[in-house]
Amino acid sequence: MPEDQASLEAEAAPYVPPQKVTLRINGALHDLMIEPRVTLLDALREVLELTGTKKGCDRGQCGACTVLIDGERVNSCLTLAIMQEGRDIVTVEGLAAHGHPHAMQQAFMDHDGFQCGYCTPGQVCSAVALLGEVRRGDASLHTRGEALSMGELSDDEIRERMSGNICRCGAYPNIVAAIRSVVERAAPGG
C-alpha cells in the first residue's frame, strides 16, 4: 500500500478509546467497555453473545436485526450501542417470560411462520411492535391515522406494517397467519 494511502486511511478512522456504556437489555443491566462506533447489533452479538438478533444486510434493509427499544422496532445495525444508554432494549431472547414463549413466538411456531428461520427473530420483534402500534393508534399507509382496533387489522395492514422485514424464503403467508392469530386473540371478545 502506498504511504499516502496509509496516511489517508489513518486520518479517516482515528483511534477512539473504548468507553463505558451501561445498557438495559432484556431487563438486565450490562456494563460494557466498547468503542463508541460499535453498533447495537455488534454489541449484542459479539460482546454480549445474544446471537438471536441476526446480521443480515448490515444496512437496515432486511430487518433481520430488528430489536425493540422502548417498545419501538429498531434496526440494530443502524444505531450505535452508546446511543441506547438509559433505554429499554428487548431482543428476541427477552420476549419469553417464565420459561414460556411470547404469544407471538408461539404463533410463529404454530403457523410455521418461518422456513430457514434466519429472519424470524427480527420478524417476531417487528410483529410484537406492530401490536403496540395498533394499541397506540399509530398510523400506517393503510390507516392514514384513522383509529384502528385489533379486530379491524386486515392482512394488507399486517403486510404494510411488516414491510421492513424481508423473508428470503417467502414464508409471508404463514407469517401473516401467525400475526393474525395473535391479533384475533388480542381483539375485544377474542
Image (cartoon, helix red, strand yellow):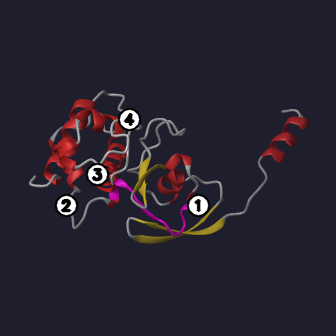
Disc 4 and disc 3: Cα gap in Å?
Answer: 15 Å
User: Of the residues tagged 1 and 2, which is closer to the observer?
Assistant: 1
Of helix, strand and loop, which one carries label 3?
A: helix
Closer to the camera, 155 or 42?
Answer: 155
Label 1 sits on residue: 83
Q: Which residues are magenta?
A: 83-93
Tell me the amino acid under the disc marked 2: His
Tell me the amino acid under the disc marked 1: Met
Q: Position of residue 99 (x, y in %)?
A: 21, 64
Disc 1 and disc 2: Cα gap in Å?
Answer: 31 Å
Tell me the amino acid under the disc marked 4: Ser
Say the numbered circle drawn on residue 163. 4
Q: Residue furthest right?
A: 4
Closer to the camera, 90 or 44?
Answer: 90
Q: Residue at x 32, y 48 (%)?
A: 130
Q: Position of residue 183 (x, y in %)?
A: 19, 47
The mark nearer the N terminus, 2 or 3, is 2
Of helix, strand and loop, which one carries label 2?
A: loop
Label 3 sits on residue: 131
**Are dots 4 and 1 in contact, CB under 8 Å?**
no
User: Of the residues tagged 2 and 4, which is closer to the observer?
Assistant: 4
Q: Residue at x 38, y 35 (%)?
A: 163
Of helix, strand and loop, which one carries label 4?
A: loop
The mark nearer the N terminus, 2 or 4, is 2
**Number of other residues with Cα within 10 Å of mark 3, as a class: few under 14, some 14 to 19, many 20 or more:** many
- Relative height, residue 178 to residue 23 (above, below): above
Quadrant where the N terminus lies?
top right
Tell me the amino acid under the disc marked 3: Leu
